[in-house]
Amino acid sequence: MQEPVVIDVQHLSRRFGSLIAVNDVSFQVRRGAIFGLLGPNGSGKSTIIRMLCGVLQPSSGDAHVLGFDASRETEAIKRRIGYMSQRFSLYADLSVRENLEFYGRIYGLSPQRLAERSLAVQELTGIGNRLDQLAGTLSGGWKQRLALACALIHEPDVVFLDEPTAGIDPVARRSLWDLLFQLSAQGVTLFVTTHYMDEAERCTSVGYIYSSRLIVCGEPDDLKRLPDVTRSGTRRFELEVSSPTARLAELRQLEGVVDATLFGQAIHLLARYELTESELLRRLNLTTASAMIRPIAPSLEDVFVTLTRAEEERELNGVRARDVGIENVVRTPTSERPDVGVRATKSPSGPFWGLRAMLLKEFSHIRREPATIFFMLVVPVLQTLIFGYAIQLKVEHIPTVVYDLDGRRSARELLEAFRNTRTFTIVDRVFDDESFERALTSGRAKVGVRVPPDYSDDLLSGRQAQAQVLIDGSDSNVATTALNSANLLGAALSSRISRGFAETLPAVPARNSAGHVAMPIEIRPRLLYNPDLESSHFFVPGLVGIIMQLVTLFLTSFAIVREREQGTLEQLFVTPVGRVALLLGKMVPYAVIGSLEMLIVLTVMVFVFGVPIHGSLTLLFGLASLFLVCALSLGLLVSTLAKTQLQAMQFAFLFMLPSVLLSGFVFPREEMPLPLYWLSFGIPVTYFVEILRGIVLRGADLIDLLPQVMGLTICCAIVLAVSVARFRKQLA
């Protein structure tokens, strides 16, 4: 009674743009079988495994593993399969024990069951005496044993092994195959890709894929009996002779010899029936004493070489493989081959020898890296534009709020004088003290002008009129400009009123409270929040936000991209770990690091730079958590865009450049051209810098910061949604 089919592939294809990686492949694998898939590099073996494991979507066709559809029921498949990738893709910086425990937990094993299974796979693979050794320090054979142990920790029904013996020594290869035979005897189905013919001989069934097409599939003995392998009228011999390499060229030119190839220290021949053993020896001037010749059955290597040549001939002639006979595949006689020997025209020497080759190679690398070309050519332009337009050292258009308690003509003239300067821009008029103070604490206005109710009366009666100007001292550069401009404005207005009067006249334009001659208008500026105009009070709070984004963005993106480069991410994709669990598992540790980084910077800010926190710490940490989610999402987004760590660094830099220059961290956003000013609203750190300065310097509350909180929330939602949508548990 035949075992049930556990892998069923029908007309499976996969395209990458114009490249057809797998073309109309069909086969079946039964329970407990060792199915070997052979083929040259790039023929599509790994692509088939990835589609069967559910990490790569087929372009067309159907595939079922254990009864589950490989396109729609991928998570159900992943719970019941094991996977060894083509290269070692476990965590090199974890110990053997930690790798086993990690994969056991991924598959949901309870602590007791994990301990049992760990002992079982240790006994099976023999790695029990290396549990505390780092995986990265293991030799090739022991790495493969560990990878197999991790693939078996959850007792899978099917195990996919992508070239499991590549790069390991013969002893380790034999040991690994002994383990595979044990698993097969226990009913585990094994799907193995390999380059080695001796390994193919050990499989219960074999498929051979060439140039994305499955040429043949069946049991090894059946494949050897295929008519196209040893065509009618031909037979195979093994010739043992001294100096076989010297005899090989001679044999290939003999009439009646269809093919000849070295096989160890012997020569395998495919010859027509009319060429007998004695006739062959006679033509080679050999005797039975100096050579041994005997008939042999074809090997799997003969099968695949013959079929490969037939496939190559089919591709050249544009006919189907079954129409190509072995007689069509004739190698060019050695005597007719062109002389391909290399004759050096010049001896390699000199310090500049090979420079041209190196230059061409490097330019080829650059040409095939679109991201590098983009950063080389586009980023400098962006930098020039940002530095040229966004960075304005001259401070103008300072947002100003007005609280006019007088309302008469003289007061209106004073406010009109403020409006007519390029330094102040009146953004709001308020009518109560609370609104006036909140406009300043929220950061909506950097300057507040309060006109007292008796301002006009004082001017008319000859007394000195006073107007209060409150200046946000957070940004010392802006505050200094506002202070000087307010004083100059008061002097200019007073000078205009005093024109035509002189000190010696009986009547003077104004006298102060002591009766002395005074300017008609006194502007009384007062610096808030940072009266000493310490620049550190402005930069350090904003630096907290920049550092948090820098740390989380770079660490998160690099961590994910590094796993993709090392292959460990693909290994995770094959496991049943949930997408949310995978994302949270990658992001939470860096959220903790980002929070710790924030505490460190805040501590330095308070105790080293002497910047006190005037607002609520609870509000500060709550909003910092929101920004942390946004920064982590940016790192995740970078990881979905970048394929290498170099690209991740370039993309992260592209995000950080506008964050530093356009967020208001260094340069006032109000001074930027309108397009860049509106662009700054799309940068999350813009809102967080305002939040930090509002809470730390001005003691702002949630109501004061509501616009910034809303903006940050919207940015966070958009970035998180895009990042999660792009991050999939599948390869591109």
Image (spheres, rainbow, N blue to C red):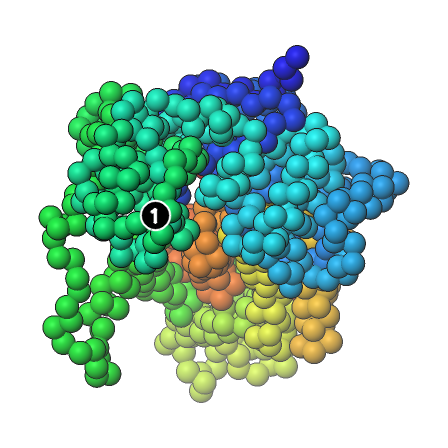
Q: Residue at x 45, y 21 (%)?
A: 26
Q: Residue at x 68, y 64 (%)?
A: 597
The image quadrant where one finds the N terminus is: top right
Badge 1 element: loop
User: Residue 143 versus residue 62: which sits nearer the camera?
Assistant: 143
Residue at mark 1: 288
Q: Is residue 511 visible?
A: yes
Left or right for 371, reference 601: left
Left or right for 215, reference 66: left
Q: Is residue 726 visible?
A: no
Instruction: Check the image and name the residue furthest to the bottom.
Output: 504
User: Residue 273 versus residue 504: which sits nearer the camera?
Assistant: 273
Instruction: Check the image and name the residue furthest to the right.
Output: 112
Left or right for 363, reference 74: left
Indicate the position of residue 551 as horizontal and vertical percent values. 59, 61
User: Residue 552 versus residue 414: which sits nearer the camera?
Assistant: 552
